[in-house]
Image (cartoon, rainbow, N blue to C red):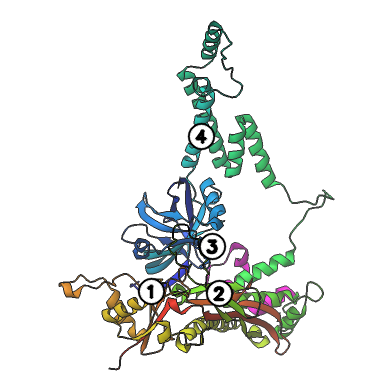
Amino acid sequence: MPENVQQQRAAHADFAVRSESFDEGARTVDIVYATGAEVGRRSFREVLVISPDAIRTDRLDSGTVHLIRDHMPWGDPLGRVIGHRVEDGQAVATVRLSDSPENAGVVADIQSGVIRSVSVGYLIHEYADSTDEETGVTTRTVSAWEPYEISLTVIPADTAAAIRSDDRMTAQLDRIEETLRSAISAPHGDEPAGATVATEDEPAAERGEQIEEEEAAVPENNDIQQAVAAERSRVRAINEMATRHGLDEAFVSQHVDAGSDLDAVRAAALDVIASRAAPEVSTATPSVRVVRDERETLVQRAEAALVSRATGEAPSDEARELRGLSLVELARRFSGAGDSVSAARAVDEALTQRSGMHSTSDFAAVLGNTVARTLRNSYESAQRTFEPFTRTVELTDFRPVTRVALGDAPKLERVAEGAEFTHGTIGESGESYALASYGRIVAVTRQAIINDDLSAFTRLPAMYGARAAELEADLVYGVLSGNGQMSDGKALFHTAHGNVMTGGLDVDGLSKVRALGRKQTGIDGAKINVSYVTLIVNPDDETAAEKILGSIAPTASGEFNPFVGRMTIVADPRVPEGYWFAAANPNLTETIELGFLSGARGVQTFTRDGWDVDGVEVKARLDVGAKAIDWRGLARSQKPAQ
């Protein structure tokens, strides 16, 4: 596939924190953020090529890649990447951790190894797809990609990417060896607790005899080495046993620290393995087994089969039998209607039969879930060009929320000898906005079911899903094009804000807009030196933008382009013609905020039996809002008239 920087995704894969590399003095830790392992996506497997040529390091080199929580761009970063390398086929980053008191707990968990998994967010520049003819599995090989953030996570997707067991075992053994040597050699060094200390009243001869007895009790070096070797053998055996039976680190640490012998460890391992295989029974009546309801199984199989038919995905083994059935034949399965019953009657009965009081019919649930899944898949796979310059948050309700941007800390003032220190204040300003609800209803009609019209499950829901994603983009780009009023009564882009200019999309224009950011002042008038990292243009100007930021070797000193590789290009048709924009990193400077209702991020779907229409209705709803939080992170340029 040709290079296209707009082919960007907030994709992620999970790798590992090397907790043993933690440097307490420098507050740094090494993170393996990519291993080249296959990671499952919705309809394909993805592999990142790990090599210096494949990884674009502009953001890594400029120090703008931060360590954050769960891909949530708001809040203070947990750290910043200060170095990177490719090592043994793995992409490794050195992160300097935050020294903020609020992050002390997270840093401690990283140091102790409690937090080990990370997830990398990256932009895809080039990839190629290949499909295995036998299995039908598509593998996407990403040959050019660019990390833009690293997140701490809890559950890793790449099971091979964890802290290496050899490293972990080495750390355990080193700690144990140090303890053994210290304990065995204690009489030669500092006096241990309980040791006999000679006093002036004690005769010298008696003191000498006592010293000789203590020295005789100390093993020789070979005894120390034998004790260490035995302990190493025990720890290695415990680690190997845990690896073989899939036991976790907590099991290993428990028995290593407790000094458990191998027989006790084997017994404990057998107990864990037996508990995994224990049958699910009721504790009150041991003779009663819990089994899955056949109707529930039919619902799951039918939904998988219908999704397979609608999307062309390979069916699971359980769904394969039902994949070849038409919608009417599926209706007969749910209603129990024989072949002698008409198609219309079979569908009517399937839509009205319920498993319990006040519930939706099972057949209707299958249809509705298939539509909802198609809609959500379309929504989630839609391209979101605004992500590089937008912060995403969750709001608790629909009431207007005020986002307070704190001003700069007050300047330090000279204090004369004997004079008192004076108090400073922190200024603040706030921008308000509220969420709004958007939605439509998708209907799968009785006629579509009888006609076995699969487009009802694919084309229309997919269009609605895409429209939901486009709505988010409309709101974000509407902030730029609408140039709405800020809390100070002036427009977002205003001369008083120092973020508006007239200049072409060329090196001179970028130089002028860069200067605007450098000269920005905080709420209290302090220079804050904003750096714009995203160039936002109309598609008509995309090629010109690529030429400006493209890597071209100059033939003369006057041809030097200082902006090569320094900005990410975003092209979208919603950008008004005749204008281009620049934006700062939303993790460092406030820009535009896109808010969702808490617990309902993204499009939400709801299903019910149709009333206004015969069939099934699926309601799609999106609770969302967008607002510019601070003008300092955004700049606009109007191209001069030709």
Helix or strand or loop: what does disc 4 sit on?
A: helix
In the rendered image, which residue does mark 4 sit on?
Answer: 175
Mark 3 or mark 2, earlier in chain: 3
Residue at image position (54%, 22%) is 191
Q: Which residue is mark 1?
A: 532
Whether residue 13 appears in this view of the structure is no
Query: Disc 4 versus disc 3: distance between alpha carbons?
Result: 32 Å
Image position, residue 535 (x, y; %): 37, 77
Overall secondary structure of the magenta section: helix
Label 3 sits on residue: 70
Q: Which residues are magenta?
A: 306-334
Residue at figure coordinates x 24%, y 73% from the top left: 561
Residue tagged 2: 404
73 left or right of 61? Answer: right
Q: Position of residue 590 (x, y in %)?
A: 48, 74
Q: Are marks 4 and 3 in contact (CB under 8 Å)?
A: no
Decide: is 563 above or below 105: below
If you read the primary sequence from the N terminus, does the residue marked by circle 4 or circle 3 appear first?
3
* Percent x, y of residue 623: 61, 79
Q: Amino acid at mark 2?
A: Val
* Front of the two marks 3 and 2: 2
Which residue, as the protein is rendered here, is positioned at the far front? 418
Residue 105: assigned label: none
**Which amino acid does the dot numbered 1 rest on?**
Tyr
